[in-house]
Every structure is written in C-alpha cells, then in structure tokens.
Amino acid sequence: MRWSCGDIADAVAAALAARARADDCEQAVYGFDALNELGLHPLVQEALLEPGFGVWAEQRYPHDDHHRGHHEGKRCDLVLTPGGRPLRDAGLRGTLFDTPTAVDPEKAFWLEIKTVPQYGPEGPSPRYAAELRRPVVKDVQKLQSDTTIRHAGLLLVLFTAEAAIAQHDLLAWHAYCLQKTPSIALPATRHIPITDRIGHGCCSVAVFEVKGGGMC
C-alpha cells in the first residue's frame, strides 16, 4: 500500500473542523484547543477510523519488541494499517497463533503525535518555542532510527493566533529539524479557522513524512 500524508492530514483536519463547529454550537467556554496532548489523541484516532484505517494506539516499536512486559519498551502513539486489519505481533509471526490477515510492521504507517499551543487558558504559553524543538525532534529521531519501520510520519497539531504564524513556524521548524536529521519531508498542511477563546484563531494540522531506518 502507498501511504499518503495528505490523506491523513485531510482526515484529521475534517474531524477537528467538525469538533470546532460542535464547540461553537455548544457555546463551550473552552474549545478543543484547550485540551492537552493526550486529550487530543481520541479525536485523532476517531478521525483516522473514518477512511477505513486500522488504528492501533500505543504500539511498541519493532526494535523494542523483545521487551515482553506490558509497560516495557518505547511505544509509538498510533500505528495505521490498511482496511482495518490488525497489526502483526512479531512474537507470533509464523506460529499457530499468528493472524493470517495481520499487517507486518514494515507495511504499516507509524505515526507520532505532538500538540503545541501558542496560548493556554492563563495566557501566552512560555514553552511554545521550546516545545517545537527538542521534544518534537526526538520523536522524529525515534521513528527514523528503527530499522524495521519503512512508513512513518509526525502529526503536528499547532494552535496559533492566525494561519500565517503557523505556516511560518512550521517551515522554520522543518528547517531546524533538517539540521538534526535529514529524514523529514515538507508537510501536508491544513489550516482550520477556530473561534478565539484563549488566543487561538487557527488550528493547523501538519503531517511530515519521516523516512524510517528500514527505507532503502
């Protein structure tokens, strides 16, 4: 299967735009831009079920699959599979307990999610620039370093006062990231206007393709 970052961005943007309209209809005091990163994950998961993907949360990275304990090993936020099929457990590959329709890790799409708001309920976020640097780049490097992964991406949800700020900051972050790792492409970006409740007038969905360590 050929994975499209544009299709992923379209699905997430459509779901977040629907959530923005729902917040307006409910006259919510705070919109979904006030959610923390983990609070946004269910919205992204539901969005990616709509095109028919299999959506598997908190999956252990293939190179950490030797950790069999429930809480051991590094995990990826989401893994997508075509047609809703399950993700193959490497420990069961070729055994009687393997699932014939399961998707091998190298054919799935591994997706890390980061949310960075310019404002919070208390005012401007003092960590906005810092959050765009080390934590986000670290996720890119995790995806790139796994030699099994062939298809991967970073979903960056950016909340800003306006779209022009997001566009500038996304391109600046991409240039910064290229200094650390050359494995990241320009993003598929969608901008969603949202009602300003805490300082944000725009939600930007950017999906950066990351070349995995297993790519030729």
Image: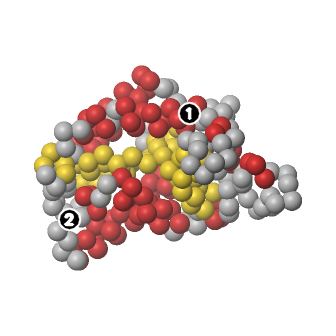
The reply, left or right, for residue 28 in relation to residue 131 is: left
Q: Residue furthest top?
A: 179
Residue 61 sits in quarter: top right
Above/below status of 171 relative to 103: above
The numbered mark at residue 201 is: none
Residue 23 sits in quarter: bottom left
The numbered mark at residue 144 is: 1
Which residue occupies the foreground of this view, 59 or 107? 59
Q: What secondary structure is found at the residue carrying circle 2?
A: loop
Residue 38 drawn at (x, y percent): 39, 55
Residue 122 drawn at (x, y percent): 13, 52
At label 2, which amino acid type do we have?
Tyr
Above/below status of 157 relative to 128: below
The numbered mark at residue 30 is: 2
Residue 51 drawn at (x, y percent): 54, 66
The reply, left or right, for residue 212 in relation to residue 25 is: right
Q: How crowded is the residue under tag 2: few (<14 C-alpha within 10 Å), some, or many (20+)?
A: some
Q: Residue furthest bottom?
A: 25
Residue 202 drawn at (x, y percent): 24, 54
Which residue does the image show at 29% across and 58% down from the upper left? Answer: 35
Which residue does the image show at 55% across and 37% down from the upper left? Answer: 143
The coloring applied to the image is: secondary structure
Above/below status of 11 relative to 118: below
Which residue does the image show at 28% across and 34% down from the upper left? Answer: 130
Q: What secondary structure is found at the residue carrying circle 1?
A: helix
